[in-house]
Amino acid sequence: MAYANLQAMFKLAQRPSHTISNRQGDELELKSPAKDALLIVKDCSDCHASLEEKAAKLLVQSCNNMVLNVKSTLISGVLEILSCKKVVVNLLEGGQVRNGQKE
């Protein structure tokens, strides 16, 4: 069985994603029209970001000097922070992250 067919069978490739990238000094509201979306924040610096609505997963990559306020639940329970410097994560009332990964 081909790999693409396996993905289709298990619906692995069908999760929507929403990317916010290349922002500097902005207030970011992390949300997507689809509640099961993968949210990606990439190449941002000196920003304050807030997750106030449910999302499947949040990936923060190559960001510097960022404050991330999590006020809602990540459905998969996963927050990944990859290749970042000086990122502060605040879990506020109602915010839930089961698994965090920092690389």
Image: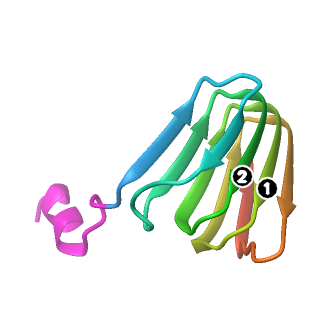
- Which residue is pictured at 59% across the width and 65% down the height? 53
Is 92 drawn above or below residue 79 in the view shown? below
Residue for badge 2: 50
Residue 16 in percent (x, y) is at 35, 55
Could you tell whether 52 is left or right of 102 in the image? Answer: left
Residue highlighted by disc 1: 69
Residue 9 falls inside the magenta stretch: yes
Give x and y (percent) for residue 1.
Answer: 10, 65
Q: Is residue 60 magenta?
A: no
Q: Which residue is drawn at 27% across and 60% down?
A: 14
- Colouring style: rainbow
Q: Do the residues labelled 2 and 1 touch (CB within 8 Å)?
A: yes
> Is tag 2's residue or tag 1's residue first in the polypeptide sequence?
2
Q: Nearer the viewer, residue 12 or 35?
A: 35
Q: How far apart are marks 2 and 1 (CA)?
A: 5 Å
**Of the pair 16 and 49, the residue shown nearer to us:** 49
Give the image location of residue 32, x and y in percent: 47, 54
Magenta span covers which residues?
Answer: 1-14
Which residue is found at the position 72% from the left and 22% from the top? 24
The amino acid sitting under disc 1 is Asn
In this view, 6 is above or below 61: below
For disc 2, the neighbor class at 10 Å (few under 14, some 14 to 19, many from 20) is some
26 vs 86, nearest the viewer: 26
Q: How crowded is mark 1: few (under 14 residues within 10 Å), some or many (20 or more)?
A: some
Which element type, helix, strand or loop, lies under badge 1? strand
Q: Mark 2 is on which residue type?
A: Ser
Q: Is mark 2 on a helix, strand or loop?
A: strand
